[in-house]
C-alpha cells in the first residue's frame, strides 16, 4: 500500500480527508506505471514520464456546493476530447492536446475506466 511522504502530506494540509483517496490513486498509478516521476508543486502533484501526463489537485472545476469532501481533481493530457459524463471540464490548450479534469470522490471511482484513460495519457505523453 502506498504511503504519502511528508511533502505530499503537506500538499493536503487544507484537505486532510483526501489523503487516503490520494494514496489509493498514487498506489494504483505507480503499480501500473512504476517508471513514473512525481513532483509536488504548490497547486498540484504532477506525474510524468517524458512529459507530464497526469496531475492531482483541488482545482475548482465545479461549484463548491457540487464538491463533497473528500475529493481530488485528476487532470489528464489526452490527444482527443474525452466524451464521458465523468468529465468535469475539458479544454484544448493547443491543437491535438486536450486537458481533461475529472473529479474523484471515492475509491470506487478509481476504476479500470479511469486507469484506461490514465494509460492513454501516459502513452500520449511518452510518444509526443
Image (cartoon, rainbow, N blue to C red):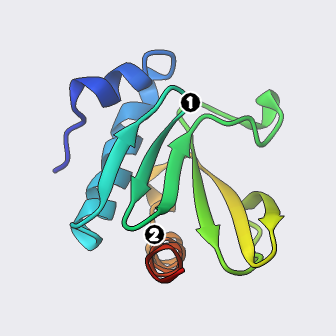
Please give the name of the residue rendered at 16% of the width and 50% of the height, measured from the top-left corner. 1
Question: Label 1 crowding class (10 Å Cα cut-off): few <14, some 14-19, many 20+?
Answer: few
Nearest the viewer among 53 and 71 is 53
Numbered disc in front, either 2 or 1: 1
Q: Residues within 10 Å of mark 2 (few under 14, many from 20)?
A: few
Q: Residue furthest left?
A: 1
Residue 31 spot, x, y in % from top left: 22, 66
The reply to whether callout 2 and callout 1 are in contact (CB within 8 Å) is: no
Q: Residue at x 37, y 33 (%)?
A: 19
Give the SS element for disc 1: loop
Of the residues under marks 2 and 1, which one precedes in the sequence? 1
Q: Which residue is mark 2?
A: 111
Camera sees residue 86: no
Q: Relative to residue 92, is residue 30 drawn left or right?
A: left
Say which residue appears at 82% left-offset and 61% top-offset.
91
The image position of residue 92, as x and y in percent, is 81, 66
Of residue 85 and residue 89, the one placed in the foreground of this image is 89
Residue 63 visible in rendering: yes
Query: Which residue reaches farthest top?
Result: 14
Q: CA distance from mark 2 to mark 1?
A: 25 Å
Q: Which residue is mark 1?
A: 43
x, y percent for residue 99? 70, 61
Question: In the figure, 38 relative to 9: above or below?
Answer: below
Which corner quadrant of the image does residue 119 belong to? Answer: bottom left
Q: Position of residue 39 (x, y in %)?
A: 36, 42
Q: Is residue 65 above or below residue 62?
A: above
Give me the residue at 40% from left, 59% from top: 48
> What secondary structure is found at the residue carrying circle 2?
loop
Amino acid at each position: 500500500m502506498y504511503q504519502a511522504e511528508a511533502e505530499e502530506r503537506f500538499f493536503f494540509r487544507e484537505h486532510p480527508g483526501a489523503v487516503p483517496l490520494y494514496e489509493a490513486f498514487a498506489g494504483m498509478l505507480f503499480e501500473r506505471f512504476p517508471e513514473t516521476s512525481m513532483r509536488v508543486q504548490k497547486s498540484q502533484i504532477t506525474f510524468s514520464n517524458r512529459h507530464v501526463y497526469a496531475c492531482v489537485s483541488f482545482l475548482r472545476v465545479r461549484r463548491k456546493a457540487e464538491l463533497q469532501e473528500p475529493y481530488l481533481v485528476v487532470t489528464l493530457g489526452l490527444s482527443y476530447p474525452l466524451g464521458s459524463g465523468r468529465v468535469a471540464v475539458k479544454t484544448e490548450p493547443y491543437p491535438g492536446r486536450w486537458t481533461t479534469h475529472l473529479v474523484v470522490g471515492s475509491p470506487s471511482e478509481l476504476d479500470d475506466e479511469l486507469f484506461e484513460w490514465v494509460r492513454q495519457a501516459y502513452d500520449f505523453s511518452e510518444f509526443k
